[in-house]
Image (cartoon, grey):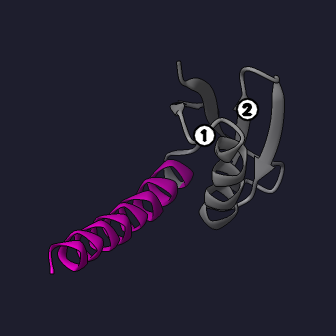
Amino acid sequence: MSVKFISHVDENTKGEWFIKLTDTLSDESIICKDLDEYKIKLEKCSSEYGFDIEVVWTKAKELSPKNYKDLNNKMAILQKEYEAEINQLNNTSEN
């Protein structure tokens, strides 16, 4: 059974977005200021459970449309990078 992690997007007092990553099994939370930090923290936390995790995304009602769009755009770029990496691995393993 996978462990659920909640990734909650909110804004700090400076009006910048951040992600609060919560392990629902241990109830521990980590604040991530950007997606690079989020990737590292999520990988570290999920490794403790053999990477068998489920990630649920939520957002604060107060999250500005500007910050939502910024995060969404950065996540789209990250998704393309992952897809390219997966395709490269698949092509390498076929040879």
Which residue is denoted by mark 2 in the rendering? 22
Secondary structure, mark 2, is strand
Residue 30's tag is none
Q: Earlier in the sequence, mark 2 or mark 1?
A: 2
Q: Is residue 16 above or below residue 28?
A: below
Which residue is tagged 1? Answer: 50
Quarter location, residue 6: top right
The magenta region covers: 67-95
Q: Position of residue 37 (x, y in %)?
A: 70, 62
Relative depth, front residue between 29 and 4: 4
On the question of residue 52 being in view, the answer is yes
Q: Is residue 16 magenta?
A: no
Position of the C terminus, as image quadrant, is: bottom left
- C-alpha distance separating marks 2 and 1: 17 Å
Q: For this rendering, which residue is in front, 76 or 39?
A: 39
Q: Residues within 10 Å of mark 2 (few under 14, many from 20)?
A: many
What secondary structure predominates along the stretch shown in magenta?
Answer: helix
Three-letter code for the amino acid on which mark 2 is drawn: Thr
**Does 75 sit left or right of 34 as displayed?**
left
Q: Nearer the viewer, residue 22 or 77?
A: 22
Q: Is residue 91 magenta?
A: yes
